[in-house]
Amino acid sequence: MSDKIIGTDREAARQRLRQAFTDPREFTSSPLYRALSRTVAGEDRLLELAGRGRPGQYPTFLFFAAVHHLLLTGTRHPLAAFYPSLVGEGRQAAPGQEAGAALIAFCAEHEQALTEVISTRLVQTNQVQRAVGLRFGLSSIAAEVAAPVHLIEVGASAGLNLRFDRYGYTVGDRTFGDPASPVQLVTEHHGTGPLPDLDVLPDLASVRGVDLNPIDVRDPDARGWLEALVWPENHDQRALLAAALELTATDPPPIQAGDAIDVLPRLAGALPAGEPRVVFHSATRMHVPAHRLDAFDAAIASLGETGPLWWISVEDAPDPDPRPAPTRHGAALRLRAPDGERRTLAVVEGHLRWLETFTDA
């Protein structure tokens, strides 16, 4: 390959990175990361650093988590003054719009340490709140399932969602689950459609996760990385994560390490033939390289070759949107039944802080 082609490829990659930081729509609840994204987009050296992650990793999430991780683990620098997670709840962090110069200096001083984190870690956010989506999906199929189900989460990270049955839930004005659990999930309910009874669930025959690099909930370093992935302003989410980690550490679910594309077909053959199974994934497909998406979907579908498969996911925006007059941008909580029928159960905020139900036309 000629130097000219190599140079063109590098420039194209840099431009893709620049676009990711120029329009960081994902940081809806982080003014600091939105401000710092503009700084990264304007600095080729920072873009080059952000691009040192493994293929398929979301560069904005990975880069800012790496910076956050170094600060949380004791790296002293003026940049910390701009992070609400570091100045402490109840204290005012410095304005994020003024943090750009500090970020540039921090990255120059700690480039080697940042490269080590960016090149070896994975974006493995374990948003406990997404357990609401899993429970909603399971309650929606409870009447259709005649036997206990084998539950598999793809992209399970630390497996916190797999302990969904040990949490308490408030959805709108209704409560479900364990009211005494230290993990209490609160979700707004919008829309005119009915909410299923989240206490009516299929029995579980087995529970397991699949992840490229499972997080050991008993490992302080691994737990620290999960904390770094929480955006600096999200104090409630950080407290919720800590509570879920403590609860799950007493009885971690089994999580198989490996690429789902390789693992799931083998797992399909290991499950008891004819017994129902449910697969769940949320904000996982977005991290799969584009050229492997078809193989990822086929691997999940392979679970249905040896028994009836219900496929629950929270990934993309609904298309078409089933709501008559959408006013909130959200993702589709989708279900594919064993007969291949696909339906959108609800439209949800990406972290399941709200969900919107609707009446079928």
Image: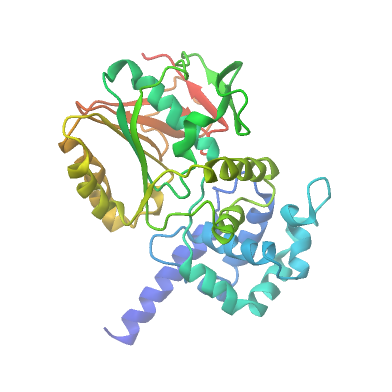
Q: How is the image coloured?
A: rainbow
Q: Residue at 26% across / 18% down in the picture?
A: 146
Where's residue 233, x and y in %? 69, 48
Q: Is residue 78 left or right of residue 161?
A: right
Q: Is residue 343 left or right of residue 78?
A: left
Seen as rendered, the residue at the extreme right is 91
Q: Is residue 154 left or right of residue 80?
A: left
Instruction: Mark yes or no: residue 61 visible.
Output: yes
Image position of 77 with respect to 221: above or below: below
107 vs 237, nearest the viewer: 237
Where's residue 198, x and y in %? 47, 20
Image position of 171 with respect to 17: above or below: above
Q: Residue at 75% across / 63% down in the picture?
A: 80
Seen as rendered, the residue at the extreme bottom is 3
Quarter of the image with the N terminus in it:
bottom left
Quarter of the image with the C terminus in it:
top left
Image position of 185 with respect to 250: above or below: above
Seen as rendered, the residue at the extreme front is 250
Where's residue 225, x and y in %? 57, 58
Q: Residue at 48% across / 56% down in the picture?
A: 123
168 vs 66, nearest the viewer: 168
Where's residue 90, x and y in %? 82, 45
Image position of 233 with respect to 344: above or below: below
361 vs 159, nearest the viewer: 159
Q: Is residue 172 left or right of residue 321?
A: right
Instruction: Mark yes or no: residue 51 visible.
Output: no
